[in-house]
Image: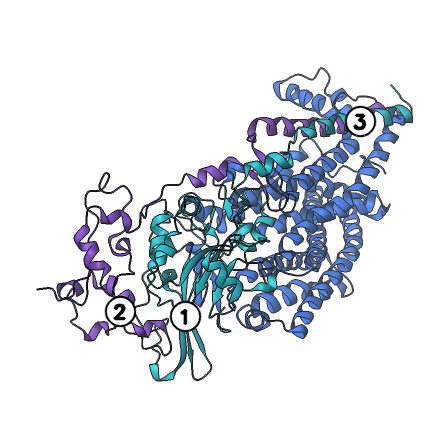
Chain colours: A cyan, B purple, C blue
Amino acid sequence: MTCSRREFLKEAIGGTVATVLPLSAFTFLTSAEARAAIADSKVRWAFLVDTNKCVGCGMCVKACKNENEIPYDAPVTRTWVERYVVTKDGETHVDSPMGGRDGFTSSAIRDEEIDPENIDKAFFVPKLCNQCDNPACVQVCPVGATYQTGDGVVLVDREWCIGCGYCIMACPYGVRFFHPKYKVADKCNFCYHRITKGLQPACVQSCAFGARRLANLRDPDDPVTKIITTERVAVLKDEYGTKPHVFYLGLDTNVR
Amino acid sequence: MKRHVLHPLWLAIGLVGLILLARHFMVPDDFGIHGDSFTYNFHRLGNIQEWKDFPVKYQGRESCRECHKDNVKTHRRSPHKNVECENCHGPSGNHPDDVEFLPLNRERSLCMRCHASLEYPNAARSDLPAVHDRRHKRKRECVSCHNPHDPREDVE
Amino acid sequence: MTEDIIVHGAEWTIKELFVYPNEFIYWSIQIVMYPYMTGLVAGAFVLSSLYHVFGQKDLKEIAQFSLVFSLALLPVAALPLLLHLQQPLRAMEPLLTPHFTSAIAAFGIVFTVYGLIVVSEIWFVYREYFVYQLEALKGAPGFWNAQRRIAYRALTFGARDVSEGAIRVDHKAAKILAGIGIPVACFLHGYAGFIFGSVKANALWMSPLMPVIFIMSAVVSGIALCMLTYIVIMEWQAFRKRRKDGAAAAGDIKGAERDVVGRATRYLLGFLIAAISLELLDLIFRGYTAMKSWDILRSVMYGKDFINIFVLQYTLGNLVPFILLLLPRLTIRRTVLALLLVLFGVFMMRWNVVIGGQAFSLSFSGYMHYHIPIIPHSLETFKEGLFGALTVIATPFVLFWLINKFVPSLRRDIGEA
């Protein structure tokens, strides 16, 4: 049973085309459908953290855990507060016991007492997911389980995540973790279920000192947006090109 | 050219066909690119609504006012006016429908979050009245002397 | 705290100084095993292709052997991933909804293509053998012979023509597949290096050299493993021959063995030099440019991990076998020692990259220590512990033994190129 080279080519090409055609079954929504489906692009959520106001009470961490059902005793959290104590000898002492869940009630950092006379400056830095414009975590997800919504928030699809952990490794800010119960990736989502109903994120609402505030960058009348656009603000680790959207007032050079 | 050379190609095509078939059954219909970019907008559309439907726990102070008028009034005029009720009482959720009594946390550790003295210069923390835990009435509950709704008032 | 609340990574991570709250060693022993196993696969295949494509006739014996071994290694390469995934039942998703911007999504495609190539090439090499086996078994009585007949019939895939023309086509096809297979094998392992090298968040991993370093050391490990297994089998055959026919008869086997091993060693040394050069280049470059991460990297590499990197990997795993293989009058015993050290060295390289990259915090102000679970007390500590790793190591040998029953890898009369 022989066939000529021509016949071989015909068969091979025919077979390949027959395979490729069903690939068009890989449907994508048209542009118009896609835009209609996603949230209002008149909204781009952002956050403002004022480290001058944070007292380290940790109520935000507690509220976040309760609101978002992150097991209270698990050492993972969607948001956390870091304490920085810069001493006169040039050392910077940093800690975040259980993410600041119980506040900072002791002046000892990792069992080391720090003499108040030696302190140059000390402050607290709340951190949370930066809902980046170019999220590295989304780029590396192998299955499309994490994604960016039209209003800028990065979400994780609990039904689809395979738990490979690549997104956790790819985030330069360390905001992601494996949910202890659902065994998929998890992270702060600005309390998406609250902000889409006109409520504030749990951490913003629980902050008695106004250190945390939500903003809609597309709303020129938003008072927080005004601060971000007119006052001097900073972001964390912008050298990674992720374009983070959590802005800081009073971000010190010692912040890691 | 012998025909049998194509056998592995048929195997390959069969495998690809299987994968596409599996895709048809196992991948939800609303999975695709929902936005401008394949990099950032490739996902299952239905998930967005799932997150929007996530239950809200913290209701905010306005929902407490209806029933707890007195405490809210006292609290509103006190130095604690910016502290949410739910910060100390926990999320109200569907209270009183599902939970009749919200927890009353009387432990020192709750108050120490703000009022433990840390002696930091130039910090907002230092603007708060503070005590050293071990030196101030150890082992007694803060609320046995201080009214949490208005800490200026003494508790009898 | 209820039973099912396990923070993945917390069990085996000890934090030191300041580490972000959510940081743990998430990619542990199975992620070390994965590039190690794919490296063996790629290396075995490249070794086989050196014969089929570049006509290195001196490698014929070991080429056939390594081709079949790479088939045994292939499913095992996917095993560490299945053991690592937090949702292993969703493991097909990278094939169903591949997000191609992710290096891991390439896994499904590359793995499948590579598998098809290896299976096809083996088919073309062994098809004649299958047909002859089928004919020899005609009319043979007994249940197992009937099973073998069914197996060989299936394996021929209906192609029973063993005329000279057909066999020539078989060999040509095998050669073409071996040729295509080399870049695919490189891709299979290069992309594994890309998985790490493209993570900009990790100061140790981020490097364009990563994919190339991984490929070079993969080929080294593949060649070493094939040589080692080949030596073991030849020694066993010589031992049996000696028992049966006396010492003189075994001498033939030993002579052939020494020849093949000597030649394969040259290739091994070449790739070893390439691998070491690239790694040293990476190290020197980091120290010279001294970016923000250099302080903590230096304290990890020259402090905490000094023994792992410079003693275990570079000295024991690279320098010592290098010297052993170059010294004159190379004996089989010295070769075996060198090969074991090489395999150990490549394993340490994977360990130092994967675990080393998580030994320091993203804050650059703290460390994480990895304590691999030894005695498993839960599914998680088994999967991501010592015994999980041992399972992965043992499986290819079991598979290889099974496959050899139908595809004998050491017969000299099969598959002339």
A210 or B113, which lies in front? Answer: A210
B9 or C199, which lies in front? Answer: C199
| Label 1 vs label 3, nearer the camera | 1
Residue C271 in percent (x, y) is at 75, 58
Q: Residue B115 has which mark? A: 2
Q: On screen, C124 above or below C106?
A: above
Amino acid residing under circle 1: Asn
Q: In the rendered image, which residue does mark 1 sit on?
A: A52
Q: Chain of mark 1?
A: A
Residue B85 in percent (x, y) is at 26, 54
Q: Residue at x 73, y 17 (%)?
A: C138
Question: Which residue is outermost to the front?
Answer: A221
As helix, strand or loop, the secondary structure at mark 3 comes to helix
Amino acid residing under circle 3: Leu
Q: In the rendered image, which residue does mark 3 sit on?
A: B6
Q: Looking at the rendering, which quadrant does residue B109 occupy?
A: bottom left
Distance from disc 1 to disc 2, alpha carbons, whole Å, reads 17 Å
As helix, strand or loop, the secondary structure at mark 1 comes to loop
Label 2 CA crowd tier, 10 Å (few <14, some 14–19, many 20+):
many
Image quadrant containing the N terminus of chain B: top right
Q: Residue at x 71, y 55 (%)?
A: C220
Residue C281 in percent (x, y) is at 71, 68
Whether residues under marks 1 and 3 lie with C-beta atoms below 8 angstroms apart, the answer is no
| Label 1 vs label 2, nearer the camera | 1
Distance from disc 3 to disc 2, alpha carbons, whole Å, reads 79 Å
